[in-house]
Image: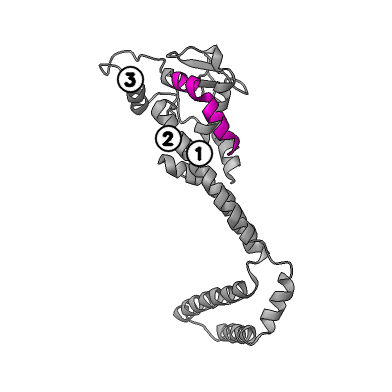
Amino acid sequence: MTRVAGLCAALALAVVTSSTPVQAQLGGLRGRIRDAAVDKATGNAPAQPAAAPAQAPDMPHVDLLLDAAGVDKLVVAIRAEMADRDAVAKELAALEPRPDYDTCLGQAYNSPEGQRLQARQMELVQQQGTLTDAASLQRFGEEYEAFGVEQKAYFRKECGPSRDEQTALEYELQGRPEKVGAGALGLDPEGYGYAVAKERVKPFCAIANQFREGEEARFPGDGTEIYWVYYPAEVTTLKARCQELLVLLEDVS
């Protein structure tokens, strides 16, 4: 599954059915009950376990609270992603197959080293037909795998990456910058916490003047029973830093 498809699946989990409006957080919410970590970050934890919570119990959990400290971390992460995007662009350019790749490959096969590798491959194929016991077959498998690595390394050295190899490497490289950003936040690079944090900025900033500092904000998202939800600390911070964040996000959109 691609990261985009995976994120879409995460968004879909936010849509649930209820007899009352669901306060789901668009963009990858992990649940409907606010956990202790968010309570502590916002200063709204109840004094006693049995006491009523300071905010509605359906406030969402977020991997990165966009308060002052969280936005500082997000800025560092976005800049790390931007830097890696530049590095990836250079690496992708170096992976471009040479125009005469097929011609080069033919010449490499016909070179003395290429002929030796082909002969060795034939020997291994013939050897396989004589093996009957499991131990011998296992040893053969290991030997053939090592030969394949040697053969691939030779042709790559002579002619550069193959088209199949380039496609696989391009896919891996293109997904790397966002993982670097997630890592800068201390979040799971394979998860969606960082992507969700970025995604929560633009909807709020588009209508930030409708909200007052220190108050919770929630408004409908796209779809049925889907809402954007922001803690009071997030509202205060985002109103002050929307312009800065929007400029940064333009480079990683």
Q: In x, y percent, where is residue 68?
A: 41, 26
Numbered label attached to residue 43: 3
Query: What kind of element bears circle 1?
Result: helix
Q: In x, y percent, where is residue 177?
A: 53, 46
Numbered label attached to residue 156: none
Number of marks in picture: 3
Q: Earlier in the sequence, mark 1 or mark 2?
A: 2
Residue toward you, 196 or 121:
196
Which SS does the magenta portion mostly show? helix
The answer for how far apart the CA atoms under marks 3 and 1 are is 27 Å
Label 1: few (<14), some (14–19) or many (≥20) C-alpha neighbours in 10 Å: many
Residue at label 1? 78
Query: What kind of element bears circle 3?
Result: loop
In the image, the segment drawn in magenta is 234-253
Residue at label 2? 73
Residue 190 visible: no
Task: Judge whether residue 247 is colored magenta.
Answer: yes
Of marks 3 and 1, the one in the foreground: 1
Residue toward you, 205 or 90:
90
Give the residue type that dot 3 points to.
Gly
Q: Earlier in the sequence, mark 3 or mark 2?
A: 3
Give the residue type that dot 1 points to.
Ile
Give the residue type that dot 2 points to.
Lys
- The residue depicted at 44 percent of the width and 30 percent of the height is 71
